[in-house]
Amino acid sequence: MDETPAVPFHIAIIMDGNGRWAQARGLMRALGHRAGAEAVRRTVEAGRELGVRVLTLYAFSWENWDRPAEEIRGLMDLLVEFLKAETPRLRANQIRLQAIGRLEELPHRARATLQQVIDDTASGDAMTLVLALSYGGRQELVDAARRIAALVREGRLLPEHITEAHIASHLYTADLPDPDLIIRTSGEMRVSNFLLWQSSYAELYVTPTLWPDFTKAELAEAIAAYQHRERRFGRSQPSPRQDEAIGPAGRRQVVG
Ligand code: IPE
Ligand code: IPE
Ligand code: MG
């Protein structure tokens, strides 16, 4: 058996602390977000270099729509600018872009640019970069419930036949494995409506570092911490092959 501890297949990051980073420097929050975008660029590159296969970044939550209109506008402009600037690099590094969330709520320009970059990077097979935008874990479950209820109403599914796999396959993350490691920056010990279903057995890592200060070294540190964790998935012994036991909830078989 290979004794080298596996790099987490899927890392998801709650990128928090842009505002505090700016405030500590007497700058506008917008400049914190700009520095945050630079940290995104660095982290994507670092993830790819360290062998992460799926990197999900929580960029804008459902609840973030409650922020001042000017801040939202700035974030959406920054998203478009970032996507356009990064496309060549994503393509050169075989990184495929995906997005999860209520994307229909995004301004037209952001949505169109996002779709363009998703299409332009579709053949990337080294890493999948998933941006969580207008994303909320509860809203995702509501949307899944609506779609499953519609199948039942159409007579295509019986309520007693609904399994974990059905629910997983109606989430925005239907085609993605569950996260192995969730990192949150800026020290907050909460999940803020992120990947509620998918995080059931994710390892958590919280760092006090503010998002704009996050580096490749810190990502490597989080991965090293993960490699020392003992994942049990409810069993009395650690799972022998950490990477095999995970997969989307829908793919795990209930034994016995
Ligand atoms: C994270 O930084 C970025 C988004 C949520 C869009 P914040 O803007 O939440 O920064 P703090 O938490 O106020 O420091
Ligand atoms: C979580 O950060 C959302 C994102 C990182 C996009 P928030 O700053 O919105 O979370 P709370 O309000 O501190 O829980
Ligand atoms: Mg915050």
Image (cartoon, helix red, strand yellow):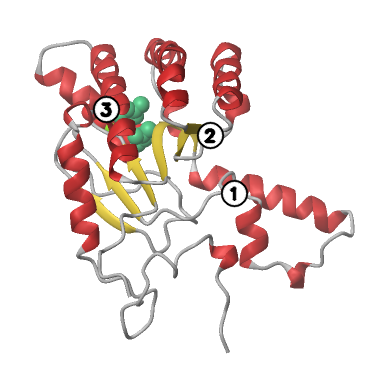
**Residue 239 located left or right of residue 115:** left
Q: Which residue is most to the left?
A: 25
Decide which of tag 1 and tag 2 comes sooner along the chain: 2
Marks 1 and 2 close (CB-CB < 8 Å): yes
The type of residue carrying mark 1 is Asp
Q: What label does residue 175 carry, if any?
A: 1
Tag 1: Cα neighbours inside 10 Å, few (<14), some, or many (≥20)?
Answer: few
| Quadrant of the snapshot with the N terminus | bottom left
Q: Which residue is mark 2?
A: 98
Residue 239 visible within the image? yes
Q: Would you identify the image quadrant in which residue 21 lies?
A: top left
Picture coordinates of residue 169, whole percent (x, y): 65, 54
| Quadrant of the snapshot with the C terminus | bottom right
**Residue 168 located left or right of residue 93:** right
The type of residue carrying mark 3 is Arg
Ligand 2 visible in quadrant: top left
Q: Is disc 1's CB within 8 Å of ligand 2? A: no
Of 170 and 49, the residue lying toward us: 49
The type of residue carrying mark 2 is Gln
Q: Is disc 2's CB within 8 Å of ligand 2? A: no
Q: Residue at x 39, y 36 (%)?
A: 57
Q: What label does residue 42 carry, if any?
A: 3
